[in-house]
Amino acid sequence: MRSGRMCAAVLVVLSVATTAVGCAQGQRPEKAPPEVRHDEGPIASSLPQLGDVESVEWTYEPLGVADPRVPGPTDRELRGYARLAEADVRRLTKQYAWTEATEPPPTPPPGGTAGTHWQTSEAFEASAGSGASAEAAEFRLDPVGRVMVFRLLNPS
């Protein structure tokens, strides 16, 4: 009788240990913050419509947490902002119809953006988004501050 209790106790301990290990393995790792980049080359090649950018800050990261247990592609997002040359702001405002944005930019640049009148253009979003082969694109222009905020899903 005593060996039966011993076997039952061992089975309970093994069951609890197996469950604890299984739960720990099922936890998703925390997502590390994306690397913030300042090199202009990748943005210039992905978004030539912006023209000559004076400075840029951007990230390119997978959405969600990549999990090798789930098959299929991972969506990636390119987001950031660029300070544009004055001539390029003039060109963009003449070449595309811009209207006041109803929402703030998806990734506002640091610093004082209060009181900024962000503008959006469906034609520019379609042109720049398809040029980057993105599935979705969102842009906000501050013509006074010469800042373009961008967000692209799966650009190539």
Image: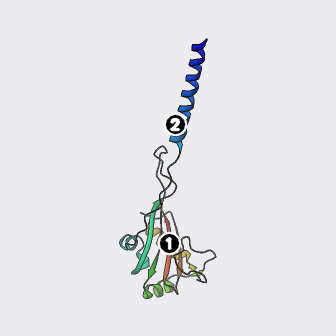
Q: Position of residue 5 (x, y in %)?
A: 60, 17
Q: Which residue is drawn at 37% across and 69% down?
A: 42
**Residue depicted at 54% across the width and 74% down the height:** 108
| Front in this rendered view, residue 79 or 36 | 36
Examine the rendered structure and indicate whether residue 19 appears above or below residue 48. Answer: above
Residue that carries the numbered disc 2 in the rendered image: 21
Amino acid identity at mark 1: Phe
Report crowding for label 1: few under 14, some 14 to 19, many 20 or more residues within 10 A (C-alpha): many
Q: In the displayed structure, would residue 11 be above or below residue 29? A: above
Check the picture and name the quadrant holding the N terminus.
top right
- Tell me the element at label 1: strand
Kind of residue at disc 2 = Val
Q: Where is residue 36 in the image (x, y as percent from the top left)?
A: 43, 67
Between the residue at mark 1 and the residue at mark 2, the CA separation in whole angstroms equals 43 Å
* Mark 2 secondary-structure assignment: helix
User: Which residue does the image show at 43% across and 78% down from the upper left?
Assistant: 50
Nearer-the-camera pick, 34 or 20: 20
Q: Does 107 appear above or below 93?
A: above
Q: Residue 19, percent across and down?
A: 56, 34
Query: From the viewer's perspective, is 72 left or right of 52?
Result: right
Farthest residue to the front: give it: 2
Label 2 neighbour load within 10 Å: few <14, some 14-19, many 20+:
few
Q: The C terminus is located in which quarter?
A: bottom left
Q: Mark 1 points at which residue?
A: 150
